[in-house]
Image (cartoon, rainbow, N blue to C red):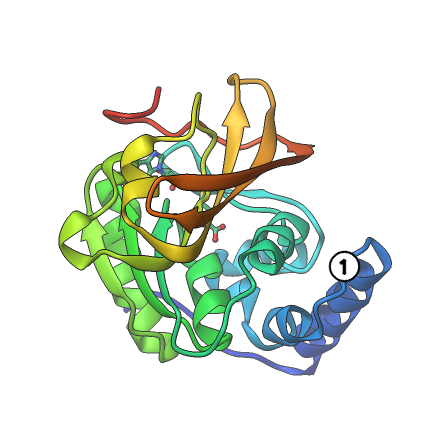
Amino acid sequence: MAYKFIDNYREQGARKRLVDVLRKNGIEDEQVLKAIGKVPRHYFFDETFWNQAYKDIAFPIGAGQTISQPYTVAYQTELLHIKKGDKVLEIGTGCGYQTCILMELGAQVVTIERQEKLYERTIQVLPYMGYKPTFFLGDGSIGRAEHSPYDKIIVTAGAPTVPDVLLKQLNIGGILVIPVGDEQSQKMVTVLKTGEHDYERHVLDTFRFVPLVGDRAW
Ligand code: SAM
């Protein structure tokens, strides 16, 4: 395999500094910060760009997609309140960095990606790094009913609305975190399922994600 996995003092030091930046910028959950401090983000970059891996920026990963900004990954993860053993559906695997963070927190992850090139790379890289989620290639905007219900659902691409079908796949007490808006900017939305047909919805900060493309999306 052509991937290079070396985690030396330079990358480890840069990762510690990234954690400090995220803490300074408002991420408070120490478990989330610990996970960011553990997962080698440079493994998702070509070696030429390792010097970019611990900057708090999104970065192209091919197929017109990006690895999310670390702040965004930490922000969405914090909102999920992951508990050990939570069953989490992730829509938009991308390179798999967010998947690793969820798994560091003890989640069992079912993850869906629609771009074949990214899917093919991720199913090789993540198990090699020691992370073994359940991978699917396809349209995540309809969720994955056969593995439901989920304790948490995270969508890592911008949607025009909250797909009802995802709410149906949540456990009572479960949380959905999804960016909702137009193609320019989205508000982070959290939905807590309080009863079979009852939901508590909160609209939070503004972000800019690549679009969620699919049957219940763009
Ligand atoms: N989670 C990634 C990370 O750790 O950095 C970033 C994901 S990237 C911002 C969003 C991903 O969502 C892209 O890889 C894109 O192909 C994928 N995507 C868009 N629409 C999708 C859909 N309907 N189902 C599954 N994946 C989708």
SS label for mark 1: helix
Residue visible at 29% across and 73% down? 132
Residue visible at 42% across and 56% down? 174
Residue nearer the viewer, 184 or 164 = 164
Where in the figure is residue 84, as x and y percent of width and height? 45, 78
Where in the figure is residue 7, as x and y percent of width and height? 56, 79
Residue 192 visible: yes
Residue closest to the far left: 146
Q: Is residue 212 left or right of residue 216?
A: right
94 shown above or below 181: below
Q: Is residue 37 left or right of residue 212?
A: right
Bin the neighbour count of mark 1 within 10 Å (Cα to Cα): few under 14, some 14-19, many 20 and up: some
Give the quadrant of ligand 1.
Answer: top left
Identify which amino acid the numbered label 1 is placed on: Leu
Q: Name the residue under label 1.
A: 22
Residue nearer the viewer, 62 or 21 = 21
Q: In this view, does 84 lie to the left or right of 32?
A: left
Where in the figure is residue 117, as x and y percent of width and height? 26, 44
**Which image quarter: residue 205?**
top right
Where in the figure is residue 106, as x and y percent of width and height? 44, 77
Quarter of the image for the C terminus: give it: top left
